[in-house]
Image (cartoon, grey):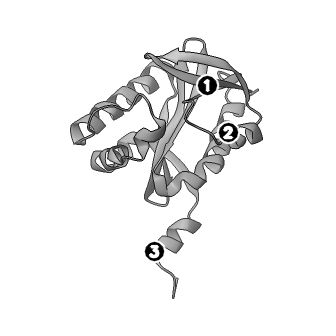
Amino acid sequence: MEGSTAREESNSSPLRFARLTEVPPQEIARHMSDPRMAEHMPLLTGAWDEAAAKDFVAAKEACWQRDGLGHWAFLRGEDYLGWGGFQKEGAEWDFGLVLRPDCFGLGLAIARKALEFARRDARIPIVTFLLPPTRRHLRPLERLGAVQIGEVEYDGRRFLKFRLEAG
């Protein structure tokens, strides 16, 4: 488009979900190495390099193989926004969302699109969300209809647990 920047054009592109294997590992490593990510990710430890990103993608792909569902890369056009999706935790499907800091404002739109998917998938009657207690802005979860059902410990860290009826 004449007079517009590539950034403006990419903002008009539709949001899409892709497999993490479509994102260069360096891009994921750069995202997860941003110090702002660790502020609300108590399980994020150690440095992220290309090898760590490849291991991460392999682990998430194993979830797809095991459960038929897993984490996606969130893209707008070809721009990588972050990653997240559904992961089977016991009998429940937990939804996680990890966006690049410059994309934080897109969380609600991405979550809504993912929950539309969940509502059409008979395997997912209930969605859970685990948030660290450092998260103070819980209004987006309330807008989605999620309710806090308590706290849980995961890998030695405390999380607030929310539940949403998907079906």
The residue lying at 33 percent from left, 50 percent from top is 27
Q: Which residue is mark 1?
A: 160
Q: Nearer the viewer, residue 51 or 105?
A: 105
Q: Position of residue 66 (x, y in %)?
A: 45, 18
Callout 3: helix, strand or loop? Answer: helix
Amino acid, disc 1: Leu
Residue 38 has which mark? Answer: none
Q: Nearer the viewer, residue 146 or 36?
A: 36
The residue lying at 56 percent from left, 24 percent from top is 159
Amino acid, disc 3: Ala
Discs 1, 2 touching: Cβ within 8 Å: yes
What is the spatial separation of the Cα atoms under label 1 and label 2, in whole angstroms?
10 Å
Q: Which residue is mark 3?
A: 6
Q: Nearer the viewer, residue 125 or 157?
A: 157
Residue 138 has which mark? Answer: 2
Q: Position of residue 155 (x, y in %)?
A: 43, 17
Dot 1 or dot 2: first in sequence order is: 2
Question: Which is in the foreground here, disc 3 or disc 2?
Answer: 2
Dot 3 or dot 2: first in sequence order is: 3
The residue lying at 44 percent from left, 16 percent from top is 156
Name above or below for residue 33 compared with residue 41.
below
Discs 3, 1 touching: Cβ within 8 Å: no
Callout 2: helix, strand or loop? Answer: loop
Other-residue count near label 1 (Cα within 10 Å), few / some / many at <14 / 14–19 / ≥20? some
